[in-house]
Image (cartoon, grey):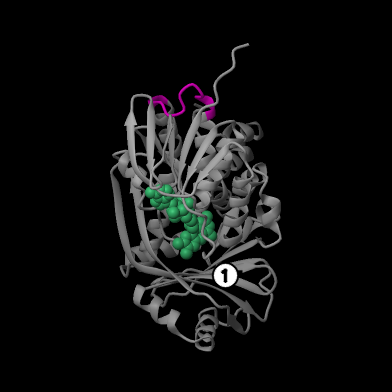
Amino acid sequence: METQAVKSVIVAGTGPVGLIAALGLARAGFSVDLVGPDARTDDRRTTALMTPALKYLSALGVLHSLEAEAAPLSVMRIVDATRRLIRSPVVTFRAVEIDERYFGLNIPNRVLNATLSEAVAGASSIRWHKTLVDRWTTTTGQISAGLADGTTVEAELCVAADGRASPAREAAGIRTTVHSYPQAALVLNFAHDRGHGSTSTEFHTETGPFTQVPLPGNRSSLVWVVRPRTAEELALLDDTALSRRVEEQMQSMLGRVSVEPGRQIYPLAATLPARFAQNRIALVGEAAHVFPPIGAQGLNLGVRDVIDLVETASKHRDGPGSERSLSIYDRKRRPDILARTGAVNLLNMSLLSNTLPAQIARGAGLGLLGSLAPLRSFFMREGMQPGSGIASALSQLRPDFGSFAIGRGPKA
Ligand SMILES: Cc1cc2nc3c(=O)[nH]c(=O)nc-3n(C[C@H](O)[C@H](O)[C@H](O)COP(=O)(O)OP(=O)(O)OC[C@H]3O[C@@H](n4cnc5c(N)ncnc54)[C@H](O)[C@@H]3O)c2cc1C
């Protein structure tokens, strides 16, 4: 029997998406050169990862270590806290409405990064070069990365997980549209008197969402989107004053609030490349899409990039970085990335816009979601996994359609 040589892949970037991509490719039988510094241990954010992403982490063998420090997310609420003429009613999404115990888990990024790093360190087919890529060179059939430590690594495929500024994306010659928002996210964790009941509440304000997400015990994480200057002013307040501001913003919903040490500010932007793969380079994570943190979509989308990339590369083992393989990956990712990017940016802009039509459209949309259970159920399923809302809706009409429609477009 003919045996195929093990193909090697370069993964550039050691944020959560790069680490997950390295583990996914190694598990699929590729030899991986991972390039990037030690994963961040100072990231104060938490990430709400939905069930489909958790299933992938479970298949990679890392979910178990994350569960102890994560909190389930069973109810998600949107509260219109604007002072505008048209305001929508509170919309509540409950996981039980779609027969799930929870939508996902809220995991501290510090824990996620440490757990993924440990798994990478233990994988024999991953070589982690703890340095940066200085330059990329593409020759026929190969891509080579010149590293800052003076060495060079070569492969047939490079996975660009090198973040929003992605030097690899630039080396691939992919044009990108970038938009900066007049917004920044203040991030912190806090303790509170009352239990959160595994509920996350997103208060929509004129400057962006104020999102509380449950952590284990009587603790929650906060992403508070405001004007950049306001974010800086809030971050400079002492603990007592900031705790009071957070409590006021939540209308004392969780009782008395005590902010924990450590506040960080993330400027908001939107980035969309014209293609998701080209010249032996495939984009994943924030190299492929950046948008404001509304509805916990970013890293969930990044995990779906990895799943599709590993599947495509596995089906094209003779040429994982070939034009054919890359154009299949590009086609697969396009609808999901464009839909999420479009929806999140539209919602964000409707919050910032003072025009009446934008307020009416947002109010009507949220109003319909609040009052129509089947529509809500559709959105909840689609929010977790593209195609599954449509699959469920079709299975209500014709039970035999359910399993067929779960796929996402034509198989490669
Ligand atoms: C406030 C906030 C809250 C969020 N909450 C959620 C949430 O609840 N749920 C969710 O799904 N998403 C959320 N997101 C989005 C999520 O954080 C991002 O999608 C995710 O962090 C992107 O990870 P990444 O690995 O693609 O990029 P990054 O984490 O930016 O990693 C990029 C990596 O590339 C490396 N790098 C850069 N240049 C080079 C080079 N030349 N050579 C080698 N390496 C290089 C960097 O060192 C870094 O390690 C949130 C985002 C924000 C801002």
The one nearer the camera, 59 or 394, is: 59
Q: Is residue 259 above or below residue 46?
A: below
Q: Residue at x 40, y 76 (%)?
A: 231
Q: Residue at x 60, y 79 (%)?
A: 253
The one nearer the camera, 293 or 365, is: 293
Q: Which residues are magenta?
A: 314-324
Q: Quadrant of residue 85?
A: bottom left
Q: Residue at x 31, y 44 (%)?
A: 170
Task: Determine whether the residue tagged by mark 1 lies in a helix, strand or loop.
Answer: strand
The one nearer the camera, 252 or 223, is: 223
Is 395 situated left or right of 307 in this image?
right
The one nearer the camera, 193 or 381, is: 193
Residue 295 image point, x, y percent: 51, 59
* 322 magenta-colored: yes
Q: Is residue 48 among the parts visible in the rendering?
A: yes
Per the image, the residue denoted by label 1 is 221
Name the main secondary structure of what is drawn in magenta: loop
Residue 29 image point, x, y percent: 59, 30
Dot 1 amino acid type: Ser
Q: Is residue 286 among the parts visible in the rendering?
A: no
Residue 305 image point, x, y percent: 49, 42
Residue 298 image point, x, y percent: 48, 54
* 104 magenta-colored: no
Q: Residue at x 61, y 71 (%)?
A: 220
